[in-house]
Image (cartoon, helix red, strand yellow):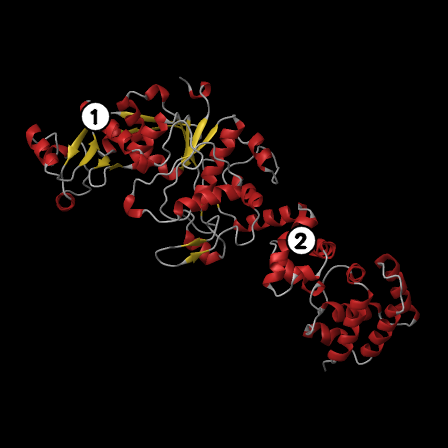
Amino acid sequence: MSTSQREVRVRFAPSPTGPLHIGGVRTALYNYLFARQHGGKMILRIEDTDSQRFVPGAEDYINEALAWLGIEIDEGVREGGPYGPYKQSERRDIYREHVKMLLDSGKAYIAFDTPVELDAKRAEIANFQYDASTRMSMRNSLTMPVDEVARLIADGVQYVVRFRIDPGRDVAVDDLIRGRVTIKSDILDDKVLYKSADDLPTYHLANIVDDHLMKVSHVIRGEEWLPSAPLHVLLYEAFGWADTAPAFVHLPLLLKPDGKGKLSKRDGDRLGFPVFPLEWHDPKSGETSSGYRESGYLPQAVVNFLALLGWNPGDDTEVMSMDELISKFSLDHCSRAGAKFAYEKGKWFNHTYLQTMPDADLAELFKPVMKDNGVDPDDFSDEYITRAVGMVKSRINFVRDLWDNARFFFVAPTKYEPKAVKKRWSEEMPTIMTALANLLEGESNFDGAYLEPKVLGWIEQNGYHLGNVMNAFRLTVVGECKGPHMFDITDLMGREATVARIRAGVERIKPVE
């Protein structure tokens, strides 16, 4: 059956060996966008067959990260579904059955070679690999008597099951992004499919069996998986499943922001950006790695940013909601070339999404930041916090940036920026500021629209320098010569706070020679 006639069913199948890398997140996102656009299902399968590398907490991390990003799972360990279990360590009986199918059909064989013996062969033969040219000189069921094989197994001798690959074939991998890729079977080795030591398959066998039984229609994975694809094509044939094999999609790699090579955690550490969706606390080393969530990124900004690393909508649109991404997503617009991880663009997306967020919602996100800086949000009305945030949000990339830009709304300055003092605070300024404080104290109407022409007229009538007076005014209220429009600030702060800050500035600020 053609994949175009099948129900679209995709899977994201991470291993719980550590935190979910941002490249894996993009793979999950592309799977999700493709499934949702075609009205299909998104499966989360946990590939935990590598028992030696299992890391406690990694599976929960994966689920939490996908939930934070809004990537919804239809079938999985938590969600259940008709084709479970969805954790490979719980599917041993299924894999044993399929290993037996391959052994019975002669498509696979049992090998008893020890690590020491394999190392000896590698030392003896340059570029040794276990294949048609070497298998008959090794200790396996192709070279040993049947009764000896049975005796070794009965005695509990550890063994592996290897897939038998015949040379002289052109193996074609049809890829929806890269087209047809043909590999000579001669360069493929007889991969291990199962290890008796832990009674678990390798990912080669587990992937094929699970994708078939879970009726996966499209396997959308990273480019690094491409070398394994010919083996998987041969496995589908060996099981007699070639007609129902999924379509392959190999995504472009995420590349370093600078230089060459694949994006790594070291790049993030070196350049100061996260490579994990959530903060990760390594249970073995105790090391903490930064995450996009804890660094202040909005999930919708991360999703939008990642979607455009290796794909484009076919036009100049950049800012897209999840629903818009779903409607526009197409594998036809995925790049073959790797995508440089332009982390600064991620900041731009976060800035853009913060600008479109309602001020009241942004104020709620700001309240924990206020607490972290020793200010109780309950000391201020929601309206006050919301208006303060709205005045400065154009200057921020992250919610935490609000504090540096809006602190003066909540904490009166006790120190004043030295360069501004030197430039704006002359010997006569205390007298002028005192007069301004007296003027403002007598105003019953403190609305900015009323107060601005009043103060500007007073400056002109007295022959003062407009820039010097207004900057000194700002210096006393804000602590430095920056911030929103001055009369928007006073409108929010009110007469009492504004006048008190001017008088405190007159007392504290001393002219700099």
Front-lying residue, 26 or 438: 438
What amino acid is labelled 2 in the image? Ala
| Residue 107 disc label | 1
Question: Distance of mark 2 from mark 1, alpha carbons?
Answer: 64 Å
Residue linked to disc 2 = 363
- Say if 256 sits above or below 172 in the image: below
Between disc 2 and disc 1, the foreground one is 2
Q: Is residue 137 left or right of residue 99?
A: left
- Say if 130 sits above or below 340 in the image: above
What amino acid is labelled 1 in the image? Lys
| Quadrant of the image containing the N terminus | top left
Residue 318 % position (x, y): 60, 40
Front-lying residue, 411 or 341: 411
Front-lying residue, 168 or 119: 119
Quadrant in the picture for residue 227 = top left
Residue at 24% x, 27% y: name it: 97
User: Do residues under tags 2 and 1 come within 8 Å of each other at their CB atoms?
Assistant: no
* Extreme residue in the front direction: 378
- Say if 388 sits above or below 167 in the image: below
Residue at disc 2, secondary structure: helix
- Say if 463 sits above or below 70 in the image: below
Front-lying residue, 22 or 176: 22
| Quadrant of the image containing the C terminus | bottom right
* Extreme residue in the right direction: 461
Q: Is residue 355 left or right of residue 245?
A: right
Residue 349 % position (x, y): 59, 46
